[in-house]
Image (cartoon, helix red, strand yellow):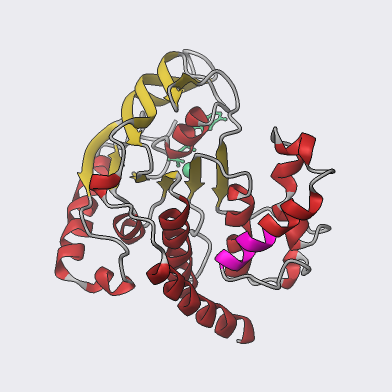
Amino acid sequence: MTLLHTESSLYQSNDATAKLASVDLSRAGQAATDFVEISDVTLSYGGDEGVTAVEDLTMSVRKGEFAAVVGPSGCGKSTLMKLTTGLVIPQTGRIAVDGTAVKGPLDIVGMAFQNPSLLPWRRTLDNIMLPLEIVSPHAQRLRKHKAEYVARAEAMLDLVGLGGFGSKYPWQLSGGMQQRANLCRALIHEPGLLMLDEPFGALDAFTREELWGVIRDLHQRKKFTVVLVTHDLREAVYLADRVFVMSARPGRVVLEREIGFERPRPIDLTYTSEFNDIVHELREKIAEARADTPPIG
Ligand SMILES: Nc1ncnc2c1ncn2[C@@H]1O[C@H](COP(=O)(O)OP(=O)(O)O)[C@@H](O)[C@H]1O
Ligand SMILES: [Mg+2]
């Protein structure tokens, strides 16, 4: 109860921060350049005889854009994330991030998944600083500039409403707080691209909405590019500038929907009829895609 209450009041302070944010992320202010480009990509696991996860997949995400990807289970959404970050390499097609072809794991990316996977023996602050020990140029600078990096990690914690919790161990935090810390860890090295694979899927509805506010505010302030995979259509429409709907496996994009609601978006937006019309439109498209699902095997 106490933790839930804490999170609720933190959310309100985040809302206040959002109102103070001076960054203008209106569409007109965004560069029209594509930050992520995926062209005619096909990937089969286990070679040509194996499972074709995505086929002729083409999509691009503009710099600074918040993109969401939705689609039936098993359609290749996580594969899309792995392809974009260079964790798997496609058999055919081209993937580029920030103008450079992806040939292996990228370090300009921050990632967060459904399971926060914080290391239980490290305090929250030390968990958040983990990427700094790995990613250049921070890894080389960390020892000499420790105080500067600790200040940066503490500022990130403040930003997501976890100020003062850095000395706690992950198991002392609620699920929602762990996911806030997970977002901090994904962003501590200031990546240009944030990849989120169903990051809020395991949270209760109330906590999930609080986390929407957190990621909304982080995006508004830090101006990174986001690709969010989610099965929650409300989440996609609330957060994204554009939603991509994927077909059943082998996955490809069957609908691209611009979401024009102005920012910052209040949570009440999700109760308007305009909002629900878009959710319904996407839901119908997914139902069509699911109907095409091939039998397992
Ligand atoms: N490492 C793997 N080896 C073999 N098949 C895989 C592997 N990863 C995913 N697949 C298969 O590829 C398809 C797409 O998986 P995935 O990208 O995880 O889908 P989604 O995230 O949309 O649920 C599924 O049929 C899945 O079983
Ligand atoms: Mg997945």
Image coordinates of residue 206 in percent, x first then y, are 45, 75
Q: Up-down: is 8 above or below 167?
A: below
For the residue pair 41 and 109, the one nearer the viewer reads as: 109
Quarter of the figure with the N terminus: bottom right
Image coordinates of residue 63 in percent, x first then y, are 37, 37
Quarter of the figure with the C terminus: top left
Magenta segment: does it hold 206? Answer: no
Q: Up-down: is 39 above or below 204?
A: above
| Residue at x-position 29% and y-position 41% | 244
| Residue at x-position 33% and y-position 25% | 57
Image coordinates of residue 77 in percent, x first then y, are 42, 38
- Main secondary-structure element of the magenta-colored stretch: helix
Instruction: Tell me: 70 left or right of 78.
Output: left
Instruction: Tell me: 118 left or right of 90.
Output: right
Looking at the rendering, the stretch of residues picked out in magenta corresponds to 153-160
Residue 134 occupies which quadrant of the picture? top right
Instruction: Tell me: 115 left or right of 36.
Output: right
Magenta segment: does it hold 154? Answer: yes
Residue 88 seen by the camera: yes
Image coordinates of residue 277 in percent, x first then y, are 15, 61
Q: How many marks?
A: 0
